[in-house]
Image: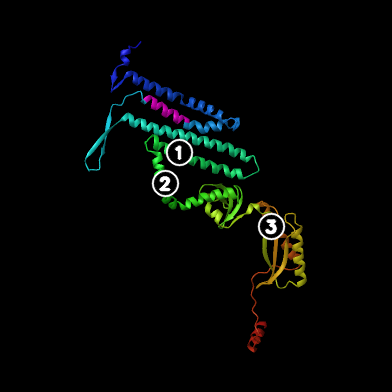
């Protein structure tokens, strides 16, 4: 066995025993951090077992295993380094108001700096774990919300997730100021009350957008998944955040609109309509007589109202005499809200209108010009014509 005197030998201000404890704690922490992190994740999951089901077990572990590993690693490093003494000190000079006059000097050791650094990192990892727990809770709530027909909860869960994460971040920030930098948090918050007015004025638009987000949740002009149109932008609502609403357009681009614009502008919730309106004008040639025109209008209106994809509010009417033809206005409503089905029904009706026009011996007009001259044919013109015949 090794003599105890060996462990009491001093090298660089520390005994061999201290170096062995340093290495042993560090080695054990590195070897078992993965196992311990999974074990702690499983134990924490038991607190949420009633809230979720067993199928969310792996999701919870995958979210927490990384921050818990970091927390264990930092704790291991802190415990191992604390086995060593750090005799080196640095003097920090504190000056009075008189320039160059030293009032006092404060000795700061390397150990104090290490303690502050590790305290900073451990607090960060702790709040990281809290943020991951919030992510897990929102994951479970979103899963439960997807099982219901109500879309409001699909919209509310991401918003509450961001809200609580923002609150936790603010709490973590003031915790770091108080415990690591020894700042009087209450005095700081009181001081911010004076500058709060200036900050509020500078962040006026951000506050308006935040209030707009609460208005959206209370008034519910739309929910996530609705097809909306605002300020010329049409698309499906994907997310309502603190500051803005994200809309996936028909071109598959992502449009971000401030929440204030969503409630102040004219917003159309296209998902709440019960039909899609189709309105257009067809031009028939002036060779079409009145009897044929009446038949065309009657057949178009009859076909539209009897179509399985439309309601009975369709109509066709002779609107006006156009520059190139007789203008017939056609209006009808497609009952399906599915865009692809709407396109198919509109195509069927357009093709049938073409057949109706052709069956009644008419045709579609297109821009033409006719030149009519009242000038009589001259003798020279006749002679030219006769010479051409010869």
- Residue hosting label 1: 171
Secondary structure state at the residue bearing disc 3: helix
Distance from disc 3 to disc 1, alpha carbons, whole Å, reads 57 Å
- Residue assigned mark 3: 346
Q: Compare residues 97 and 220 and report the one nearer the observer.
A: 97
Q: Secondary structure at mark 2?
A: helix
Left or right: residue 71 versus residue 362 is left
Q: Position of residue 240 (x, y in %)?
A: 55, 47
Which secondary structure type mostly characterizes the magenta part of the structure? helix
Task: State the separation of the CA atoms marked 2 and 3.
Answer: 62 Å
Query: Which is in the foreground here, disc 2 or disc 3?
Result: 2
Is 134 included in the stretch rendered in magenta? no
238 and 348: which is toward the camera: 238
> Image point 43% across, 50% down: which residue?
197
Foreground mark, 2 or 1? 2
In this rendering, is residue 50 above or below 215? above
Residue drawn at point x = 70 percent, y = 58 percent: 333
Callout 2: few (<14), some (14-19), or many (20+) C-alpha neighbours within 10 Å? few
Q: Decide which of 89, 194 is in the foreground and name it.
A: 194
Name the residue carrying label 2.
193
The percent coordinates of residue 313 (x first, y second) are: 73, 60
């Amino acid at each position: 066995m090794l003599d105890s005197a060996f462990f009491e030998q001093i090298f660089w201000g520390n005994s061999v025993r201290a170096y062995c404890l340093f290495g042993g704690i560090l080695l054990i922490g590195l070897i078992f951090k993965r196992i311990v992190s999974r074990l702690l994740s499983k134990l924490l999951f038991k607190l949420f077992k009633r809230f979720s089901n067993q199928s969310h077990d792996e999701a919870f572990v995958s979210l927490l295993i990384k921050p818990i590993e970091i927390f264990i690693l930092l704790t291991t490093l802190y415990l191992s380094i604390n086995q060593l003494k750090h005799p080196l000190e640095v003097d920090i000079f504190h000056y009075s108001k008189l320039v160059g006059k030293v009032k006092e000097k404060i000795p700061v050791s390397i150990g104090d700096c290490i303690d502050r650094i590790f305290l900073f990192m451990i607090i960060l990892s702790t709040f990281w774990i809290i943020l991951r727990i919030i992510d897990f809770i929102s994951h479970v709530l979103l899963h439960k919300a997807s099982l219901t027909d109500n879309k409001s909860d699909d919209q509310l869960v991401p918003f509450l997730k961001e809200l609580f994460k923002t609150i936790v971040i603010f709490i973590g920030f003031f915790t770091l100021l108080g415990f690591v930098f020894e700042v009087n948090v209450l005095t700081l918050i009181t001081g911010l009350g004076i500058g709060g007015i200036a900050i509020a004025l500078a962040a006026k638009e951000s506050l308006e957008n935040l209030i707009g987000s609460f208005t959206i949740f209370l008034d519910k002009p739309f929910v996530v998944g609705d097809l909306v149109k605002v300020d010329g932008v049409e698309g499906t609502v994907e997310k309502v955040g603190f500051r803005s609403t994200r809309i996936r357009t028909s071109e598959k681009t992502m449009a971000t609109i401030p929440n204030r614009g969503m409630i102040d502008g004219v917003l159309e919730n296209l998902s709440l309509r019960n039909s899609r309106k189709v309105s257009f004008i067809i031009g028939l040639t002036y060779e079409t007589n009145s009897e044929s025109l009446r038949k065309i209008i009657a057949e178009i209106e009859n076909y539209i109202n009897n179509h399985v994809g439309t309601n009975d509010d369709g109509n066709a009417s002779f609107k006006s005499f156009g520059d190139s033809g007789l203008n017939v206005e056609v209006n009808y409503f497609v009952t399906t809200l599915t865009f692809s089905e709407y396109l198919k029904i509109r195509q069927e009706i357009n093709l049938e209108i073409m057949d109706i026009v052709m069956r009644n011996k008419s045709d579609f007009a297109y821009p033409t010009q006719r030149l009519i001259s009242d000038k009589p044919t001259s003798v020279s013109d006749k002679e030219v014509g006769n010479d051409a015949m010869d």
